[in-house]
Image (cartoon, rainbow, N blue to C red):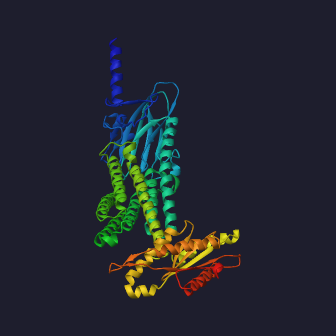
């Protein structure tokens, strides 16, 4: 009995020597939905490179310490780290499980599986290798292993100059695929929306040749490239044969994305015109940050280049809010959209940056906060550009309308008259329907101007145009034909009906009274000539000429009358 107790004590001593007292064991039969950082022990050696066997000895000797957080985070520029976890399988059959490291920018990852102090499996992966050399074709790092009965110790060495944030999961194939599917849908939706906005604004640029639409498309494209770089989609889909570019993609794309964002903001808010000094400060700052980043890349200082790029982005966030605020105070009608979009961007970027650096918990929301903020930014700025397009179109239509309107009488001028009448005229020729034209002229208008001044003459013209608009039918087209002459186009109107309309207009004009400066009531009359289509051989200009001839007859006959072919 004494020997049995001594033997049991020796086994317990050996067990705790091999597996430290603070170790937590994972069971392959248990489903772990969240990151398993609290099961992982950590060791960082300042003595340089540590082999896998030395790391295993350090683990057995209790030099590893248990992590307190589900997601392990060491920040930017951390030294290489060793991680250890113990996984047990009480069943007699092997069970396949996947270790998922859900970070896409780690340089080197070595994973070693030990059972009964013997190395049974290893993986070597990371961004420093070609994408094709990864164990599985996935943008994150996935290492599968068949865990046999007993205890398996997994040692993981991670090295990265970028932010070393390590959300690690233990999943079966089904849960791994489900996780990938959900993320694929979310990224597919985001990329689809942003690419649609890129295409929409680029087409607007093609049609309008307005620089903000092109600059906004470029800004969104560079954001997509940056997002693809730090999510791993770029290395998986676009540059899988270039690990060197994968290493430098993040700081470089941060730089060009920020520069393109500033270019859009400066044009969109018209900063160069409104605040030239602010414009120059922004341009000099962009040049300075870009030069520092390129210099750091040239001398192969990745951490410095990354930190400057991050600083450049936050300078963009802060500057965007300031530019939006001062533009809003200057009554820029689009600044409210830009300011709100900038606030969403800075909130999302700040949350993600702090999560990656380890200042706040790392989870799905904090990691994707930049994407959420950028989606809100893109939609708000798209609304602003759409409103700008609508306003530009309204202004263009108003300008075109004003170009076709006589400013004094608010009637169509000759150019606008022909624009509206030509299609109606063509239709009347095809249908062989009657069309009539009334040409009218104010009697003795020159005497009115000479005796009472041009100001009163203008009032006469305005009052006459208002009367004609009231007396005309809804389908009739009126035009100021020059000076005191007016033209009325009457579609689908026979000569007899046109004469009746003209007589009604003449009588109404004769009742107009305008007060003079001497408080006198001034009346005036008009002469009217009418022409109508009798066959399909006459042209529109010929019809107008015939109406003008009838107007001349009315003046010859004593004015204040209506003349037409039927009265001749």
Is 418 located above or below residue 369 in the figure? below
Q: Nearer the viewer, residue 95 or 554?
A: 554
The relative height of residue 320 versus residue 469 in the rendered view (above or below) is: above
Which sits in the foreground, 549 or 344? Answer: 549
Q: Is residue 250 above or below residue 540?
A: above
Task: Name the residue at 44% across, 74% down.
Answer: 512
Quarter of the rendering containing residue 285: bottom left
The quarter holding residue 87 reads top left
Task: Tell me the residue at 53%/83% (across/down).
Answer: 559
Q: Specify whether 284 is left or right of 556.
A: left
Residue that protrudes farthest toward the top in the picture? 1
Q: Who is closer to the viewer here, 359 or 129?
A: 359
Rendered location of residue 128, percent (x, y)? 45, 53
Report x, y in % for residue 520.
Answer: 35, 79
Asked if one can make out residue 261 in the rendered structure from this viewpoint, the answer is: yes
Q: Quadrant of residue 52?
A: top left
From the top left corner, tell me how far across and down residue 35 is, in percent: 39, 37
Residue at 30% from the left image edge and 72% from the top image edge: 276
The image position of residue 459, as x and y in percent, is 40, 77
Quadrant the N terminus occupies: top left
Q: Tell me if residue 33 comes above or below residue 92 in the rendering.
A: below
């Amino acid at each position: 009995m004494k020997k049995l107790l001594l033997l049991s004590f020796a086994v317990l001593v050996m067990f705790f020597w091999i597996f430290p007292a603070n170790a937590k064991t994972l069971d392959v039969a248990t489903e772990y939905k969240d990151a398993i950082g609290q099961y992982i022990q950590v060791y960082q050696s300042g003595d340089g490179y540590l082999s896998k066997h030395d790391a295993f000895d350090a683990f057995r000797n209790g030099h590893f310490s248990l992590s307190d957080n589900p997601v392990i985070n060491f920040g930017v520029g951390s030294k290489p780290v060793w991680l250890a976890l113990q996984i047990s399988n009480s069943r007699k059959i092997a069970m396949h499980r996947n270790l998922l490291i859900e970070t896409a920018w780690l340089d080197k990852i070595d994973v070693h599986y030990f059972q009964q102090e013997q190395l049974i499996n290893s993986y070597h992966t990371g961004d420093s290798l070609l994408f094709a050399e990864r164990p599985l074709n996935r943008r994150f790092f996935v290492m599968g292993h068949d865990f046999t009965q007993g205890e398996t110790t997994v040692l993981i060495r991670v090295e990265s100059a970028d932010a070393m944030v390590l959300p690690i999961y233990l999943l079966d194939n089904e849960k791994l695929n489900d996780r990938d599917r959900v993320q694929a849908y979310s990224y597919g939706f985001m990329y689809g929306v942003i690419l649609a906005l890129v295409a929409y604004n680029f087409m607007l640029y093609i049609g309008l040749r307005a620089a903000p639409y092109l600059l906004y498309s470029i800004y969104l494209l560079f954001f997509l490239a940056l997002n693809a770089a730090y999510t791993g989609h770029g290395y998986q889909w676009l540059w899988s044969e270039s690990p060197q570019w994968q290493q430098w993609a993040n700081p470089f794309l941060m730089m060009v994305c920020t520069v393109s964002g500033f270019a859009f903001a400066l044009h969109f808010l018209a900063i160069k015109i409104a605040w030239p000094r602010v414009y120059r400060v922004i341009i000099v700052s962009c040049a300075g940050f870009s030069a520092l980043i390129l210099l750091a890349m040239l001398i192969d200082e990745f951490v410095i280049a990354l930190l400057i790029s991050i600083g450049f982005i936050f300078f963009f966030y802060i500057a965007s809010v300031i530019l939006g605020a001062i533009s809003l105070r200057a009554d820029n009608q689009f600044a409210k959209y830009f300011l709100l979009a900038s606030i969403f961007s800075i909130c999302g970027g700040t949350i993600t940056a702090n999560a990656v650096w380890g200042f706040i918990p790392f989870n799905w929301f904090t990691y994707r906060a930049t994407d959420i903020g950028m989606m809100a930014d893109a939609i708000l700025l798209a609304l602003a550009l759409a409103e700008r397009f609508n306003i530009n179109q309204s202004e263009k239509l108003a300008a075109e309308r004003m170009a076709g309107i006589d400013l004094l009488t608010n009637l169509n001028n000759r150019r606008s008259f022909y624009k509206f009448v030509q299609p109606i005229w063509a239709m009347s020729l095809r249908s062989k329907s009657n069309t009539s034209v009334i040409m009218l002229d104010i009697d003795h208008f020159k005497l009115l101007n000479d005796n009472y001044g041009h100001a009163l003459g203008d009032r006469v013209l305005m009052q006459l145009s208002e009367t004609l608009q009231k007396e005309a039918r809804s389908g009739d087209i009126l035009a100021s034909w020059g000076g005191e002459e007016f033209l009325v186009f009457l579609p689908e109107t026979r000569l007899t009906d046109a004469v009746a309309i003209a007589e009604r207009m003449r009588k109404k004009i004769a009742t107009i009274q305008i007060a003079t400066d001497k408080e006198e009531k001034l009346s005036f009359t008009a002469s009217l000539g009418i022409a109508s289509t009798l066959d399909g051989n006459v042209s529109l200009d010929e019809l107008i000429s015939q109406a003008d001839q009838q107007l001349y007859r009315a003046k010859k006959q004593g004015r204040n009358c209506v003349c037409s072919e039927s009265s001749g």
